[in-house]
Amino acid sequence: MQTDRHIGQVLLGADNISLNFGAVKALIDVTVEIREHEILGIIGPNGAGKTSLLNCINGVYRPQEGRITFKGQTRQRLKPFEAAEQGIARTFQNVALFRGMTTLDNIMTGRNTKMHSNFALQAIWWGPAKAEEMANRAFVEQIIDFLEIEAIRKTPVGRLPYGMQKRVELGRALAAEPDLLLLDEPMAGMNLEEKEDMCRFVLDVNDEFGTTIALIEHDMSVVMDISDRVVVLDYGRKIADGSPDEVRSNPDVIDAYLGVSH
């Protein structure tokens, strides 16, 4: 667990969130705070509502009850592209990249919210549009260096191994310069070496860029090692919220994972 950084004020608050899909209750009166500069781990058994919570935060789903505030402003009917413009970036359980495009071009798509030249100038690559794209490309090259993927910058991502695709997806999210980065199982399907690399990059993003991170992860050793705080969901309800040590010893959490209470 990290202990040498200052955790700031509440950046995002999800207050009393309930989300239903017909008779299925995905989230039930869930309240979660995400504070500036922290790494928040979100854990729980399969079907606990973890991804649904992230989907509510970045506008994929609209909860039937509750409210979400970001940077002190209550958000209403927010769409994913609007969340991205406000400073929330996201990766997904299943890699969502353009498989025929190169690593560089995939990461460049993360700069869309930073491009403001009109379409005509972009089409002919002239004047301010050319200068803007060159500046954005230079920023993306810095991300490529940071993630140590220079060797694959011109490789179509469909040819890359799964672990490397996950790293490219992280790069695309970072290209948006988010204040809040949501990672949905960033280490799923990775071997030990790939997990160690991804842990290092997550910690470095948090430390060097000051990016606030909320991540879903099933590897408990990873969550407990890198998280400042851990939230636990079970059957759509929040059952624990605290430091890794507090959560690790919480009897409700032990029951949920060992199946004692179900």
Image (tube, rainbow, N blue to C red):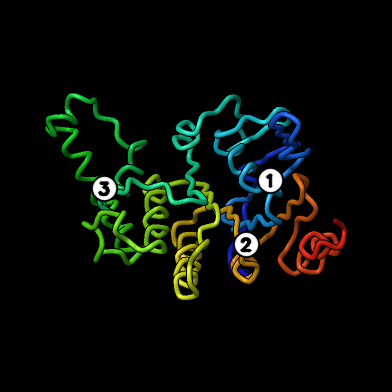
Q: Residue at x 50, y 35 (%)?
A: 83
Q: Amino acid at mark 1?
A: Gly
Q: Nearer the viewer, residue 160 or 230?
A: 160
Find the distance from the CA under tag 3 to the CA under tag 2: 30 Å
Asked if the residue under mark 2 is in contact with the one under mark 1, i.e. CB atoms within 8 Å, the reply is no
Q: Please tell me in which quadrant of the rendered image residue 85 appears.
A: top left
Q: Which residue is mark 2?
A: 218
Asked if the residue under mark 2 is in contact with the one under mark 3, i.e. CB atoms within 8 Å, the reply is no
Residue 79 place in picture, x, y as percent: 51, 29
Residue 66 place in picture, x, y as percent: 73, 31
Find the distance from the CA under tag 1 to the CA under tag 3: 32 Å
Q: Which residue is mark 3?
A: 101
**SS at mark 2?**
loop
Q: Is residue 114 left or right of residue 242?
A: left
Q: Amino acid at mark 3?
A: Met
Q: Nearer the viewer, residue 250 or 8?
A: 250
The circle on residue 253 is none
Q: Residue at x 33, y 57 (%)?
A: 143
Q: Residue at x 17, y 27 (%)?
A: 121
**SS at mark 3?**
loop
Q: Amino acid at mark 2?
A: His
Q: Residue at x 55, y 33 (%)?
A: 59
Q: Earlier in the sequence, mark 3 or mark 2?
A: 3
Mark 2 crowdedness (10 Å alpha carbons): few <14, some 14-19, many ≥20: some
